[in-house]
Amino acid sequence: MRDLTRDDIEALAIGAAIFGTGGGGDPYIDTLRCLEMIDGGARIPLIELAELEDEACVYSVGGVGAPGVSIEKLEQGEENLRALHAVEREVGRRADCLIAGEIGGANALGPIITAAQAGIGLVDGDGMGRAFPEMQMTTFSIYGQSSVPAAIADDKGNVVVFRNVVDELTFERLTRACVVEMGGTAGSVTAPMTGRYVKRVAVPATVSRAISLGRIVLEANLRHEDPVPLICRAERGTHLLDGKIVDLQRSFRGGFAVGEIVIEGSGVHKGDRARILFQNEFLLFSRNDAPEVTVPDLIVVVDIDSGHAIATESLRFGQRVAVLSLPCDPLLRSPEALAVVGPAAFRLAGVEYRPTV
Amino acid sequence: MRDLTRDDIEALAIGAAIFGTGGGGDPYIDTLRCLEMIDGGARIPLIELAELEDEACVYSVGGVGAPGVSIEKLEQGEENLRALHAVEREVGRRADCLIAGEIGGANALGPIITAAQAGIGLVDGDGMGRAFPEMQMTTFSIYGQSSVPAAIADDKGNVVVFRNVVDELTFERLTRACVVEMGGTAGSVTAPMTGRYVKRVAVPATVSRAISLGRIVLEANLRHEDPVPLICRAERGTHLLDGKIVDLQRSFRGGFAVGEIVIEGSGVHKGDRARILFQNEFLLFSRNDAPEVTVPDLIVVVDIDSGHAIATESLRFGQRVAVLSLPCDPLLRSPEALAVVGPAAFRLAGVEYRPTV
């Protein structure tokens, strides 16, 4: 156990954006808020899975909605905390510590703020090892923990509690319907888990891995070195393509940012034409119309020079990008996980999941 | 205080359909269920407003959704009860008695079933004196009682609690979004009220008035007498038009049944062409393109022979109908009420409310 530092936060923002695979929300505002809290004396212990007590009461925290919305609709700042208090009251048990539902983008930083507000620690791990768009897409839910009672809270003060749901997909649908009415984003907290369960099903050490990854990018930038091969080496990734975005379609549909980009290859990839579909996060990378990488493996689009990840809401025509794939955690490759986060779960017809590494 | 009888229930179904002004849901199934419960020995005391204790804890109960849906999607039977238990748990106070949110259609009978299930009585009154499509459209809400904490429950076992909302319109929007995901109908219970408050703002005696009105129709049918003038006499109504439905548009939009009918006048009204807009309930009656009756006054379409009300979901091309207007309760005619249930609240541009009587 150690306390998160300023340097950790700055690196985490960069690493979490990479793990965000296009989603998770822009970490800029939450990074500033974390730094301000640390500067103000907040201590946020990062708890390794091995240190977690079996009987600890752990709540999973994260923002829900379309990532692009949060750029224009600023958070009030206590959405997650209000959702946490609502679920704590519902189950009659205070949180001993928090864990991020997803380590991607802003959702890596939001739970740190919530932990500081609640005066408790954050577990070094998460429920995805990446970002996914829907509520049921966590290892917590996949391996048998019900997400309810859960609560969502918006920036204006609305709090909705999901007391009983018949299944996790219904929980997702009800949550999404409310989040759309709330303006497209909300804080959410799901049912508490025991430390024992979290140790078994959380994707391990993803906070510290995201911090390390961010450091690698920052240091490469300082040395004017290409960060892409370093990212690949650190996370056993594959450098898929360099190129330029030549087409971009994006819309806000059903509460999600959905669309696709087309990238024309350059350099050694000249002549290649790649297409990436997304629903908040990147779902499918195809080259010359042949599927190559799909969920749950991570498809990462980075600025070709800086190696900083580009979120789906920041994609622009003409951007010069590198595309990487990173292998997902083995916990996402089981048959029960693939049923929830594999290509079929995203209605990618005729696409099979073939592990990248 | 007296117990509701079989005869009461049969008459109530007919009277409540008239007060439903096209909405409130088809009372057929709930009538059978009420009769079955009474046959099985259930006692449901009907409590006059004057008998209600100031400190009584009164919950308002009713179905929410599009009335047409409930014809094909049968209720499970304990939706309202589960919603009641959820709110009781939320506020830590058991109900002393229930009151119908609206006296229209099935929503006059559902609260009787819930009262029998909970073993408590029903107040003789409601929050509308008719039916309205949206959650905030009750005298309870209009005169200052917050609807939350509230809960909705569906036929499958899903229960959503609205713990905090910033205003009543937000409560309506969040509820509606969930109800649409629940399949279009749900049971709902809103925050408890004191007996003192209910005595001040409930539309009085609407259960017994609906029973009387139903009896008038039943007895006229037995005597082969025209019930329309008798309905008008009992409720100070106006016989607007006899005619035939010559056009009908209806769709399920945003969780509501919305549309319009065109009626060609017959008999003394020959040459008249009337149009009635609806959103679950009838909103506006125009004759020869001139608005004549609007919400909150009641527009009632009845079968021209039997005097039985025709709900918006049962309107058919070619039906021969009589159209009546009944004055709404004075509680709905105040400026604060008209802001919530008047023509402007239904976006009826350029239409002013002019009381019918």
Image: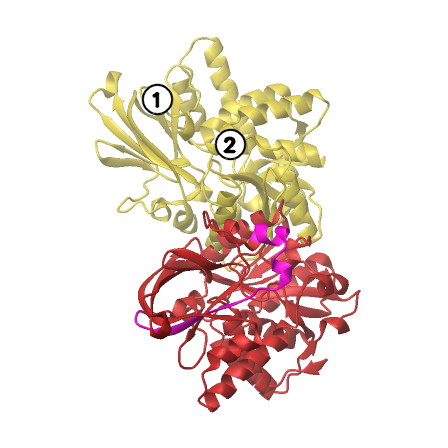
Chain colours: A yellow, B red
The image position of residue A156, as x and y in percent, is: 61, 39
Q: Is residue A54 above or below residue A326?
A: below
The outermost residue toward the top is: A223
Q: Amino acid at mark 2?
A: Ser
Return the residue at label 2.
Answer: A70
Q: Nearer the viewer, residue B331 or A87?
A: B331
Say which quarter of the image contains residue B100: bottom right
Residue A171 visible in image: no
Q: How many marks?
A: 2
Write the residue at 56% across / 56% down. Answer: B135
The image position of residue B199, as x and y in percent, is: 73, 65
Q: Quadrant of the C terminus of chain A?
A: top left
The image position of residue B195, as x and y in percent, is: 75, 65
Write the residue at 63% across / 41% down. Answer: A157
Q: Which mark is residue B223?
A: none
Q: Nearer the viewer, residue B20 or B264?
A: B264
Callout 1 crowding tier (Cα within 10 Å): few <14, some 14–19, many ≥20: many
Q: Which mark is residue A322?
A: 1
Q: Is residue B229 above or below residue B248?
A: below
Q: Quadrant of the N terminus of chain A?
A: top right
- Label 1 resides on the chain identified as A
Where does the magenta region start and end? Answer: B316-340
Disc 2 is placed on an element classified as helix
Q: Amino acid at mark 1?
A: Ala
The outermost residue toward the left is: A271
